[in-house]
Amino acid sequence: MSLKSTLSAATALGLIAAGGAYADSHTATITIATVNNGDMIRMQGYTDQFTEETGIAVEWVTLEENVLRQRVTTDITTNGGQFDIMTIGMYETPIWGANGWLVPLDDLSEDYDVDDILPAMANGLSNDGTLYAAPFYGESSMIMYRTDLMEKAGLEMPEGSPTWEFIRDAAAKMTDRENEINGICLRGKAGWGEGGALITAMSNSFGARWFDEDWNAQFDTDAWKDTLTFYTEMMNESGPSGYATNGFNENLSLFQQGKCGMWIDATVAASFVTNPDDSTVADSVGFALAPHRDGVDKNGNWLWAWALAIPAGTQKEAEAKQFIEWATSKDYIELVAENEGWANVPPGARTSLYENPEYQKVPFAQMTLDSILTADPNNPTVDPVPYTGVQFAAIPEFAGVATEVSQEFSAAYAGQQSVEDALAKAQDITNEAMEAAGYR
Amino acid sequence: MATKASRSAARLMMAPAVILLLGWMLVPLMMTLWFSFRTYLPLRGGDKGWTGFDNYVRFVTSSSFWPAVSTTLIIVAGVLAITIALGVLLAILLDQPMWGQGVVRILVIAPFFVMPTVSALVWKNIFMDPTNGLFAHLWRFFGADPVSWLSNAATPSIILIVSWQWLPFATLILLTAIQSLDSEQLEAAEMDGASPLARFFYITLPHLSRAITIVLLIQTIFLLAIFAEIFVTTGGAFGTRTLSYLIFQRVLESQNIGLGSAGGVYAIILANIVAIFLMRIVGKNLDT
C-alpha cells in the first residue's frame, strides 16, 4: 500500500472514529441548568453514580437564583434548546406547562411512585392535573434560632407560631453589636424570589395582599405600610449591616458564622445550619413556625419547590426523564442518607420520607412538614385574592413587576427612600403593569 | 495610481466584507425597530401584532425612564472624571525613571485584563461586603462602623468599580502620549523658572489634549452600555438602574420584547446625541 493510500485510510478511520465518538457523546450527554443551593451542589457530587449506572453523562450549568431564572426563562421562551433539564419552581411550572413548553411527566415508572410526592408539592407543580416538574426538594419557611442566645436573653420560644412582636423583642435582646451578633437576619436583596418572597410572605401574616379581586394593586393599604414599617424598624434595630443586599446564601453564611440570633427563611436551610462541618452553631439551633401578627390568623411562611423539568423539544427526552427519576427518587434520598446522614437528604418532596422512623428523629423534620402543611397557595392571606401562590402571584407578569417592586423596597431598607415613597412607587409600578397587560 | 479596472476589482473584493458587516449591524437594528412597533410578549402567546408608537410612549412615560437616563449619565461622567484625572497623574508618575518600572506598569495595567463580571464579584465579596469584606475589617480596625457600600452608596461604588477597570486604559493611552512630549521643551521651561504646576498646565496638559479626547470618546461609547457590574453587584436596585439595565429588565425580567425594543431605540438615539455632542465639543482636538 502506498503512503498516500495509507494516509487516506488512516484519515478515513480517524474520521469514522471521531464521528462515532461525537455520536456517542451526542446521545449520552444531558445539560442541566440548576441553582447554586447546597442540595443541588450535593447532588452534583453523586452524578457520577448516575453516569455509571446509565452511561448518560451530565453537564451542569450552576447559577445564582436570579440569574438561573433569567437564563431558563429566556431559553424556554426563545426555544433556545440550551438545556435538557431545567431547575424551576412552583411559579414557572404551571405557566410553562399551560403554554406547552414542558414535557408532561405523566409516564414515570411505577417504581418511582409518583403518588408518594407530597400533595402540596404535586399540586404546585401541575397544570390541569398534569405533573410538569418533579420536586427535588420542597420547602416552606420557618424560624431558625440560636437556643443559647435565646436562653441568655431570658426568653423561651412559644409553642406554635410566635407573634412578630415577640420576634422583634427577642431580636433586640439577642443583639450584641460588640460581638457582631445580630438579633435577626432576613432577606432584603432585590429580586422577586429573594427579598420579594420574604416580604410577600410576611405581608400575608399582616393581612396584606398584592391585588384585590379586580387586580388593583394594594400597596396603598395600612396592612402593607405596617408590614414594611415593622420590617425596616426591626432590621434597623437588630439586623446585620447591609441587609438590603442579603439573600438566602448571604444569610446562611451569617447564621453559620454565628452572627444571627434568628433567621426566618427556607426550611431547607435547617440541614445546613445544623451540619457541624459547615456551621459553628450547629449544636444550638432551634426551630419554630413562622410568625404571625397579633390578631391575624395567617403565618408568614411560604411554599416552594425546586423541581426538575424537561423543556419540550429537547432531543434527549428519554435520558432527561431517566435523570429526573434518579435524582428525585426514594433511592436517591437513601443514597444521601447512607453517605451523609438523614439530616442531609433533600426534604419536603415525598410523603414516605416523613413516615420514615429514621427521618422522624431529625430535629427539624416535623417542623418542616408542619410549615409546608400550613401554607395554602389558594388562600394565602386574610382577604380573598384572584391569584394562587403564597409568596408570588402565578401570572406571567409577576416576575418582572415583583422584581421592580422589591428594588423599591430594598432602597427603603437601605434608607434611600421612605417606606411611604417605596409603597407609592410599588403601587404605580404594579398598576401600570397590570393595565398594560390588560388586567384592569 | 489606481486604474479604473483596479478600483472596480478592489470594490468587488471588498464587497463581501462590507455586505457582511452591514448585515451584522443592520439586521439586529431592523429587528429592534420592527419589534418596537409590536406587542411581543413571549409569556403571553408571542407576537400579538402592530401597536404603533404605544411602546415608545409607555417606555418614555414610565416612572423609571428619566431616573435611568440620569443614572446612566452620572455613572459615565463619574467614571470619565476619575479615570482621566487619575490617568494623567499615573501617566506622569509612570513616565518617571524608577526601579522596576516595567513591573509597575504591568501591575497598573492588569485590571484591564480582568473580566467585568469577575472584577465586580471580587469587589462585592472581597472588598465591599459589610460583614466579611476587607473594607469592613479596616473600618472596624479604626473603630468605625462598616459601610454597606452597595446599598448605602451604590452609585459611587459602581463608579469606583468601573473606574478601577477603565483606569488602565486611560493610563496606557495617556502614557503613550506623554512619552512623545519633547523633554527639551520642559527643560527650557524649567530653566526659565516655570513652576512644576505651570509646566503641567501650560505644556503637559495641552500636549495630552488629543489623547484625553480619545479616552473620552472611546470610554463614553463603552460606558453608556455598562451592564455587568450593575447586574452582579446591585441588580439595578438602590438607584443604579441605567438605561441599558432598564431595557434588560423590560426584555428579560418582564418578558416584554416590544417595550424593551422601544427602549433600545431610545438608547441608540441617546448614544448618538452624546456622541455628536462630544464630537462637536471635544472632537475638534482630533482635527488639529
Image (cartoon, coloured by chain):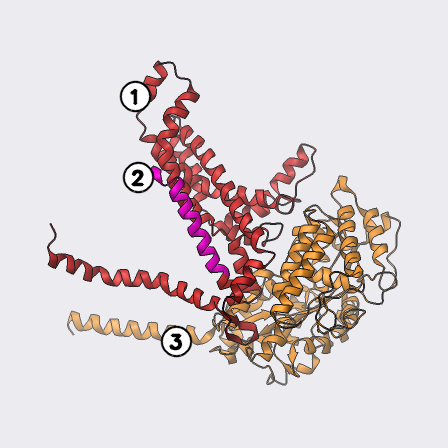
**Is disc 3 placed on a helix, strand or loop?**
helix
Between A256 and B218, the residue placed more toward the observer is: B218
Q: Chain of mark 1?
A: B
Question: How far separated are the C-alphas under marks 2 and 1?
Answer: 26 Å
Which mark identifies residue B56?
none
- At label 1, counting other C-alpha atoms closer than 10 Å, the crowd grade (few under 14, some 14-19, many 20 or more) is few
* The colour assigned to chain A within the rendered structure: orange
**Where residue B158 appears, x then y in whole percent?**
55, 45
Question: Which of the marked residues, 2 or 1, is nearer the chain's N terminus?
Answer: 1
Asked whether the residues under marks 2 and 1 belong to the same chain, the reply is yes
Q: Are marks 1 and 3 in contact (CB under 8 Å)?
A: no
User: Mark 1 belongs to which amino acid?
Assistant: Glu
Q: Measured from the top left, where is residue B11 in percent x and y?
A: 19, 59
- The three-letter amino acid code for the residue at tag 2 is Asp
Report whether residue A284 is seen: no
Residue at mark 1:
B184
**Nearer the observer, B213 or B164:** B213
Q: Which residue position holds label 2?
A: B287
Provide the residue designation for mark 3. A23
Q: Which chain is red?
A: B
Question: Given this view, does label 1 or label 3 mark the residue nearer the observer?
Answer: 1
Could you give the CA–CA distance between mark 2 and mark 3, rounded to whole angstroms?
Answer: 59 Å
The reply to whether callout 2 and callout 1 are in contact (CB within 8 Å) is: no
Classify mark 1: helix, strand or loop: helix
Residue at 59% of width from left, 85% of height from top?
A107
Which segment is the magenta one? B263-285
